[in-house]
Image: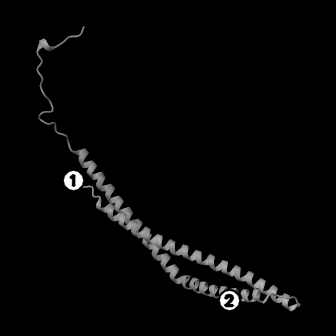
Amino acid sequence: MGKFNISNFDELFSKTKIVAESLNKKGSQAFDMSRKRLEYLDAKAKLSKLYEKYGKIQFDAFVGEEINESDLEMLTAQIITYREKLTDLKAQLDEANDTTDLRREAEDLKKEVIIASQEAKEVIKKQVENAKSVIAAKTAQPSKPSDDAFEVVEVEPENVEVEE
């Protein structure tokens, strides 16, 4: 007679947990990359506005208008800061965007998920077959009446009540 074994389910859940952790890690990395891309685009937009302000001040100086030198110095410092920030962010994005690594990791993850799902399917299939055989074995056994299944009861006529 077959025996229903829960340990295969424990193995299934363990593998499922490993795949979920891997997916979580990849999702976290993708989220970080998206955040860096947004940060890069934001810094690029701010740098563009700083260049615009700087250009306006330089044009005002060119046409002979009086300008505030401290504003020009502050804009110059901000432009330098944002240019350095853009360079750093661009390097980080380029390093993380190595397409061969991303493709390889995506293919590895895809294979991992396929293998885990196939293993899970096999485990579940085996458990269902075991459960079916256990149920079939239990229902196929003829039930024997026990010795005390039938009990003879003697009734004295004086104890019997007759309804009319």
Q: Where residue 32 appears, x then y in whole percent?
A: 55, 75
- Comes first in the chain, label 2 or label 1: 1
Determine the residue positioned at 75% across, 88% down: 70
**Label 1, residues with CA under 10 Å away: few <14, some 14-19, many ≥20:** few
Which residue bears the numbered disc 2? 80
Asked where in the image residue 76 lies, by quadrant, the reply is bottom right
**From the viewer's perspective, is 108 left or right of 151?**
right
Determine the residue positioned at 31% across, 62% down: 8
Q: Where residue 110 appears, x then y in whole percent?
A: 47, 72
**From the viewer's perspective, is 159 left or right of 94?**
left
Instruction: Name the amino acid, label 1.
Output: Met
Asked where in the image residue 90 lies, by quadrant, the reply is bottom right
Q: Where residue 57 appears, x then y in whole percent?
A: 81, 86
Instruction: Name the amino acid, label 2.
Output: Ile
Mark 2 or mark 1, whichever is nearer to me: 2
- Whether pointer 2 and pointer 1 mark residues with C-beta atoms closer than 8 Å, the reply is no
Where is 31 relative to 135, above or below?
below
Question: Which quadrant of the rendered structure holds the C terminus?
Answer: top left
Q: Where residue 6 appears, x then y in whole percent?
A: 29, 58
Label 2 secondary element: helix
The one of 31 and 125 positioned closer to us in this rendering: 31
Where is 113 relative to 98, above or below?
above
**Label 2, residues with CA under 10 Å away: few <14, some 14-19, many ≥20:** few
Where is 162 relative to 133, above or below?
above
Which residue bears the numbered disc 1? 1
Q: CA distance from mark 2 to mark 1?
A: 79 Å
**From the viewer's perspective, is 144 left or right of 134?**
left
Determine the residue positioned at 58% across, 82% down: 93
Asked where in the image residue 125 lies, by quadrant, the reply is bottom left
**From the viewer's perspective, is 100 left or right of 42?**
left
